[in-house]
Image (cartoon, rainbow, N blue to C red):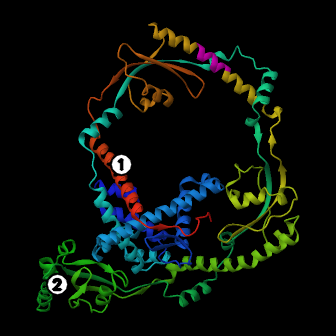
Amino acid sequence: MLEKIREGSQGVGAKIILSLVILSFALTGVYSYLGTNTGQVAAIVNGEEISRYDLDKAFQNEQNRMRSQMGEMFDTLMGDPTYMANMRQGVLDRMVSERLLDQKVAAMGLRVSDSQIQQAIVAMPEFQVDGKFNNEHYQTVLRQNNLTGSQIRDMMRTDMARQQLLMGLLGTEFATEAEAEALANLQQQTRDMRYVTVAADEYRDGINIGEAEAQAYYDNNPSQFVQLERVQLEYIELDVAELSKQIEIDEQDARDYYASQSNIYSMPERRLAAHMLFEGDDAKARAEAALARVRAGESFADVAVAESDDSFTAENGGELDWMTPGTMDEQFDNALFALEQGGVSEVLETDFGFQIVNAKQIEAGTLRPFEEVQAEINAALSADKAQQEFYDLQQQLADVSFEIPDSLLETAEAIGAEIQTSPMFDRNTAPAKLNNPKLLAAAFSDSVVLDKMNSDVIELGTNHMIVVRAKDYQKAGTLPFADVSEQISAQLLQQQASDLAQQQADQLLSDWKAGTAPADSTSVKAVNRMGNGILDSTMVMELFKMAKPTDGETIASIKLPTGDIAVMALDAVNAPAELKDLEMLRGRLGQQLGQSSYQALIASLRAEADVVFPQVVEQQ
């Protein structure tokens, strides 16, 4: 979230920020607006509770986000209880910080109008088709995520009010031109250098690694040749997703479902709304006067242009957008949907002032054609049937694999599944499908690898079960010398060749410092921090660490990842002829200052807050 806030503080449109931030809240349920509080409390922040349900939901969302970024690597990290416990605590800390921000917002009296929320919804790309807000798509997204218009409105109101506080804080941070110039001078500086590379490969021919030398290295470094325990598994899966692929739905069944669930596939009535908003001490009188002008025959749009205090909509005759029930607050909603087409409400007193509502156009609710939703219905019916079949088969999976614990053949026949076989793997090299902490714990348990028994039924995910047994097993131990002798010999050969190259490089370095520069050095002018795309990154890092020469050149050597040795002379440090991207750098520095201010705000709020953690936060 902070990254989006910082972007906003540098001039990116607020609607875009909100569209990105708000949907993440709306579709993941960080505050679990739709969930049921289990009664277990994860934290109490100034008397307000954060439930364990909310924490569990947010923690699951964070795991999903990390898995999408890191892939299989994150599945490996999940096997580390300490890492997962720290990650869970981090999620809770973030939720506490957000709750403190919300309390600060409430204390300051910050609020967001319905029209602002409406504008944010319209601007959200998740609700757009071909770059424009599409009400049908909007309703579909809400249905898919079990949200109503009122619920998303409430979530957006909370988050947008929070943005007011943060934007006010972060928008005041800036970097001076002098600070940006100093950073630019460092980043855009270039250096002139010469270098010689002493290749390790040139010294390999005279080196012979005997078996005794390799054996000695093997004996002295046993930790380098440890082999973890390895297992090859046979397994049977039961997965609703796979079951549903095998189910065909009769068209008549789909039509019957369509007829019985028509409310799911109907589009609600929608109305093109306009309004006038009046604020200030004389708001009610001005609103009544404006309404009287409309009643006397003036057009609503003309009066809105002249009188409405909502400048964003006034210039368009007060027009808001197409709305469905629940889009706005209850008072506005009731007034809008009680009107005939073209009708105008009485003056409404709301939290935002005095309003007059106009129903410009009305479109009746419609039912999506069967052909349009048939694939969706087939998928739903397939999932339902697969779910029922899954419930029936999972009991058989558990019963038969337990009753006949030394084989999977009978279990496979009982549920109509195939026995699959994995390659040999250790805990760090498990295939992606099997790289699950619960499964790995079972796969390497004594009952599976030593007693050759079937595992218990393991839940890999929602409606996804597996039973495994060991087909082959190798204990942990040290790899035999015969298996690694060639690897050791190659390693020692490269190491000794690199050592000889280092000796030659040391002599070159000494001679160069004494004034005898190598005749075959390579000269490179104006090297930037990217190495001009031609230099090894290790050389570039060392080059920019070297002190600016004051009399002659500065000389150093460095070992490269290949084992080669580079001897380098820094001849000159060049200031940039023209500083580039100063505004961008100022923006970045401002962002860093803004982040510091945000952290300081949170630290201040936490220092003054009464935060209680009733239960120890455990990894789920």
Query: Where is residue 347 shown, x and y percent of the image?
Result: 20, 89
Query: Where is residue 97 shown, x and y percent of the image?
Result: 43, 63
422 in the magenta segment: no
Residue at which label 1 appears: 592
Above or below 272: residue 513: above
The magenta region covers 496-503
Residue type beneath disc 1: Gln
Residue 140, label in figure: none
In the image, 270: left or right of 414? Answer: left
**Near-viewer residue (62 or 207):** 62
Residue type beneath disc 2: Phe
Q: How many marks?
A: 2
In the image, 413: left or right of 48? Answer: right
User: Looking at the image, is mark 2 or mark 1 nearer the viewer?
Assistant: 1
Q: Label 1: few (<14), some or many (≥20) within 10 Å? A: some
Query: Where is residue 300 shown, x and y percent of the image?
Result: 17, 84
Q: Residue at left 43%, top 27%?
A: 545
Q: Residue at left 58%, top 19%?
A: 199
Q: Residue at left 35%, top 71%?
A: 121
502 in the magenta segment: yes
Query: Where is residue 302 shown, x and y percent of the image?
Result: 13, 80
Residue at which label 2 appears: 300
Above or below 182: residue 94: below
To which quarter of the image does residue 17 belong?
Answer: bottom left
SS class, disc 2: helix
To which quarter of the image does residue 194 belong?
Answer: top left
Q: Quadrant of the C terminus?
A: bottom right
**Residue 525 visible in the shown view:** no
Q: Quadrant of the N terminus?
A: bottom left
**Residue 201 visible in the shown view:** yes
In the image, 177: left or right of 414? Answer: left
